[in-house]
Amino acid sequence: MNKKKSVSLINDSFAFAVSITALVALVLDYGYSTSYWMHLGTDIFYLLSAFIYLYYFLGQFPKKGNIKDKPLGYYFVLFLAAVLAVISLLNTTNFLFNQSANLNLYTAGMVFILTIFDLSGRLYRLDRQTLHPALVFALSFVVLICIGTLLLMAPKATVNNISFIDAIFTATSAVCVTGLAVLDTGKDFTFIGQMAILGLIQLGALGMLSFTSLFALFFKGFGSFESRLNIKDMINADTIDGTFRRLTQIVLFVFLIEGIGAVVIFSSLEGSIDTFNERIFFSVFHSISAFCNAGFSTLSDSLYEEGFRYNYGLHACIAILIVFGGLGYGVFIDIYQYFKKSISYSIYRIFKFSWSKNPQKLKPHLSLNSKIVLNTSLILIIAGTLLFYFLEINNTLQEHSQFGKLMTSIFGSITTRTAGFNTVDTGSLHLSTLVIVLFLMWIGASPGSTGGGIKTTTFAVATFSIVQQVFGYKSIRIGYRRISQTALNRATAILSLSLVTIGISTFLLIYLDEELGVMQLAFESFSAFSTVGLSMGITNQLSDSSKFVVILTMFVGRVGLLTILTGMIRQIHTHSYSPIEYPEEEIFIN
């Protein structure tokens, strides 16, 4: 290794150490009560970090004539580092002489952004590590849960101190967008704690790899072929070149829907919340929580709280956000392309004019995956609504008007499929209704979405497989398309593993806390696996051992046991292709 490479490696390692230390400094600054000297120390560290980042990024500045070799994001980050150096110098000077922290928030924010850019670039270089991509995906959730646990254990995050098991339970529930809570989110957590939970929900829903990959692509460029291939598979992009565009579309779509949802929720709170700032925070928190299918609420009894129980406009907005988040990003992008092509093709048909050289390519069509997701979701919502209405009309729906009964039934059908908000007392539902809820929770949302469960496509493929067997078809056919054997095998594996996971989880919960009730514990297990968050009111009564079981169930439900097993097994065993075909032999199955 020559001297130039050695210096570059040292600089890179030093920058990495600064990034990690910066995250620790931010936690200390905002999570703990700081003294004068501690605050001054963090301010000085922010200042040093600014100059270290500036030196590090300037060291990568291209030579004259090679300016275009660097992505635009590099120059943006370099500019941020320069601005941070100026602001952090003013911030430190201001605090040193005036003991004022007016600029501290801006300084800390820019340090955080630069840290994320630096760490994202390192995480994106998947081709330089030896871990299987499925294992990297699972470990990204573990890392995020660990960070979230440390944040929630900070004294400023809670009104009273929080135990480690409750902190990791809450962090896991937020990252896995479940919504099960052992503490009251609105009363037991401070504003800082609630913001930490909100950040964990957002990162957990989109996946930390999606965010970091977007930052890395923007800052580091497109990297190696293997890196782009891994990201393409992770987000289901159509082509390798389309990874950055697809990631950008996903993030913009999420923020757009969440922003619109927050505005609509804000307008529905007239008379419910007095303070303007509280209304804004309530709207943003519940919009993100609803779209991410997280189910966290700052209300003690969720939407069943007095003053919100009959706010059907709020319920409708939350329900729509849940559906949008549960359908999956790929479906909405497919729908967008469908309507875009519909307009272009209509113009061509009417005016015989087209920008495309081959107008026939403008013919709009939805992918088979989108059709299955949309139709299955619609059927489940309608069926769930009708069953909820007729089973609960003389029970939990009695207190509502006729319109309220219908709205509450629709909401009940939607929220059970991984959202976790409730507008009725879940513990008061009929046993027959609870069975329907368990079934809907088990199915869950759609692939590529913020929800959990076995997914709508898995359920649909399994159903079509039954039809195939009954009618004697050689393969599963839908319209003029045939579902591959690989998809059927994967669906079968997911179904089997889900039942195994729920079975083991339920058994352990009953063994540890049998006095809480078998149905209540089974409900908790289904809710945790499907990342729903609904509970029959026993979550905060679970023993520490049971909480740990639920934590593992939430993690496995969010990441997927098949993904975890694939990553672990293929990490230690590499399958080598063999051209040898073995003879078949029939096995009796009846």
Image: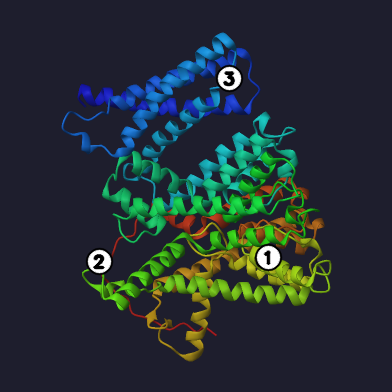
| Residue at the image point whose x is 66% and y is 73% from the top | 384
Q: Amino acid at mark 2?
A: Trp
Is residue 73 found left or right of 286 in the rendered image? left
Specify the quadrant of the image occupied by residue 10: top left
Label of residue 355 in the image: 2
Vertical arrangement, residue 530 with respect to residue 432, above or below:
above
Query: SS class of the residue under badge 1?
Result: helix
Q: Earlier in the sequence, mark 2 or mark 1?
A: 2
* Place of residue 262 in the rendered image (x, y in percent of width and height, measured from the top left): 60, 50
Mark 1 and mark 3: Cα distance apart in space: 45 Å
Contact (CB < 8 A) between labels 2 and 3?
A: no
The answer to which of 405 and 453 lies nearer the viewer is 405
Tell me the quadrant of the picture where the N terminus can be found.
top left
Mark 2 and mark 3: Cα distance apart in space: 56 Å
Classed neighbour count for the residue bearing mark 1: other residues with Cα under 10 Å, few (<14), some (14–19), many (≥20): many
Contact (CB < 8 A) between labels 2 and 1?
A: no
Q: Amino acid at mark 3?
A: Ala
Q: Earlier in the sequence, mark 2 or mark 3?
A: 3
The answer to which of 575 and 551 lies nearer the viewer is 551
Viewer can see residue 545 = yes
* Place of residue 98 in the rendered image (x, y in percent of width and height, measured from the top left): 58, 11
- Give the labeled residue for mark 3: 101
* Place of residue 251 in the rendered image (x, y in percent of width and height, measured from the top left): 45, 50
Is residue 362 found left or right of 501 in the rendered image? left
Q: Nearer the viewer, mark 2 or mark 1?
A: 2
Give the farthest residue toward the front.
Answer: 351
Q: Amino acid at mark 1?
A: Phe
- Give the labeled residue for mark 1: 411
Q: Earlier in the sequence, mark 1 or mark 3?
A: 3
Is residue 347 found left or right of 174 in the rendered image? left
Query: SS class of the residue under badge 2?
Result: loop
The answer to which of 213 and 101 lies nearer the viewer is 101
